[in-house]
Image (spheres, rainbow, N blue to C red):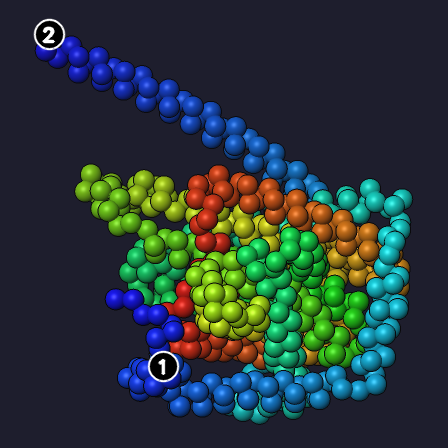
Amino acid sequence: MTVRLADLTAADIAAERMRFPHMFSHSASQRLRQWLGWTIVAGLTLYCLYRFDFVSLGFLHGVSKFAAVVVAQLFPPTGFDNLPMFIKVMGETIAMAFIGTLLGAAFAFPLSFLASKNMTRSRPVQFGTRRFADLLRSFDYLIWALIFVRALGLGPLAGIMAIAIVETGTFIKLYSEAIENLDRKQIDGVTAAGGNGLQTIRFGVLPQVLPMMLSNTLYMFEHNVRSASILGIVGAGGIGFLLADRLRAYELQEACLIIMVLVVAVYAIDYLSKTLRERLIGDHRRREPVDDAVQV
Amino acid sequence: MANAAPRGLAARFASEYAAHRRRKRVYATLFGAVFVVCVVAAAITAKFDVIKLVDGLPRTSEFLLKLVPPIGMSSFANDVREWYWDIGKWMGSLLNTLLMAYLATVLGTFIGGFLSFFAARNLAGHYLIYWTTRRLLEIARTVPDIVWALMFVIAFGIGPLAGILAITVHTIGAQGKLFAEVNENISPLPIDGIRAAGGSWWQEIRFAVLPQVMPNYLSYTFWRMELNVRSATIVGFVGAGGIGHDLFTSVQLLYFADAGAILLIIVATIMLIDVLSESFRHSAIGKASFAH
């Protein structure tokens, strides 16, 4: 049956609207709820704009100052004499991220088995390990760095430990999720052939989860290069120290060069890690580990 | 005689399997060697010093212990009250932090969401628009938010305004990219429908695109809110407002018990926000997939 638009009359449409009201619009209560939701969002936004002085001369003054002082003075970048030093410090930053990620992965690997429902029979142990991981993750890298700078002194070691601690939490979560998603049959196979606990893990579990784990680890390494680049702001090593120093001294053009080095390095690492991850898990359309701790 | 062919096959299998194993072992050894070289090089570059670390660990635990003042069983309420002596100010900072994150999320989501239509290959119209928007969004999110905060503090002075703007810029970059990816994955059929019925570009966006992408947008926005609360707790380290400012000063002034009290407030808040955001995502979005 074909319906031609020209044959439809207003009465037909009205009749259809009576028969299938939900096809034409949401119900009144649904619309009310949506309207109410948007009103609350808008109201709270207006209140915040007012509370934080967005509607003031000071704000306009700040905007003009940002345009005139900050943006205009960033370009052109200068300090190319220091470029080799910047690149060297960027290398140190990447090394910090690498060692920190590695330590985190090493701490998290055994704990992630404890945190998996299908590997640990004791519910309190499994639940406790998970919450411990949440606790480690819930402080930002910079907060841990602040703590470790006090304890270990200024320098990259504090930054490495900050990354290692946060990553322990993140990896326990990511790894245990990978372990929980594995296929039971291979484990049963190894057990049926008379394998003991360790052999079950080695031949039943690891072949299934290792690619996913490696891919997650690489992804977090990529992410941690970004994190490591700001830890220097609290004195925990890396290029962030130089950047904050130049910005605070109003040497914006040199800061611009440092930001450029940082952006190029981040892109290079992203590209490398993406290529490696695609080779590791094959299907490049596979979902990124969109984790609560991962900042995009 | 009858077994000759299978025996030949078995021998071929054995030799090919052995070759395969050998090849794998060579790769594994090579990969392992490269990896070890990387680790050693990185450890040297980053001046990773195990002795210094082991020396520092007792100091770390000492420091962590100092974060909590002695709390006796008999005088529990009093001790806790004394520990949280400045609770009024800290709660004010916490409220500021949450509102900073909220405002930055809303502003960043709206601006980033608007830009995402120009950053989606199927909606941008012209390649030049697509390319420029993509690069702008990339710059906005590749520069860390705390670096934006340092720059905004120069222009706007010390205070929450600089922090909000910094987180907003980062949110624009992140949401713009994520939303653009959602936009690129929509079905083109409704757009064709609106276009065939004579709709304008705006009507295409409103009636064909938004209904398809809204669940994913909302889900990403809740998630971004969660991340922005974390960011808002640290931008205070460079003077951009929020509870991070209180934490930073108390650590700098060696008021460790204060720092501990603030850390506890932060961890409780973050965990609460995590739980709330997750339940919101599940209830409000329902079956909306997080895949992109």
Of the numbered discs in the image, which one, if any, rests on residue B1?
A: 2
Q: Residue furthest front?
A: A6
Report the mark closest to the observer, 2 or 1.
1
Between marks 2 and 1, how big is the CA–CA gap? Answer: 87 Å
Q: Residue at x 40, y 86 (%)?
A: A30
Q: Quick check: A105 left or right of B236?
A: left
Q: Position of residue A125 (x, y in %)?
A: 36, 64
Q: Position of residue B179 (x, y in %)?
A: 55, 64
Q: Quick check: A290 left or right of B70?
A: left
Q: Quadrant of residue B139?
A: bottom right
Above or below: residue A80 compared with residue B89? above
Q: Residue furthest left?
A: B2
- Residue B135 seen in the figure: no
Secondary structure, mark 1, is: loop
Secondary structure, mark 2, is: loop
Asked whether the beta carbons under mark 2 and mark 1 sit within 8 Å of each other, the answer is: no
Of the numbered discs in the image, which one, if any, rests on residue A270?
A: none
Q: Quadrant of residue A243?
A: bottom right
Q: What chain does mark 2 sit on? A: B
Above or below: residue B164 compared with residue B3? below
Q: Nearer the viewer, residue B204 or A100?
A: B204
Few, some or many C-alpha atoms within 10 Å of disc 1 (few <14, some 14-19, many ≥20)? few
Q: At label 1, which amino acid type do we have?
A: Thr
Above or below: residue A224 compared with residue B222? above
Q: At label 2, which amino acid type do we have?
A: Met
Residue that badge 1 annotates: A9
Q: Residue at x 46, y 60 (%)?
A: B188
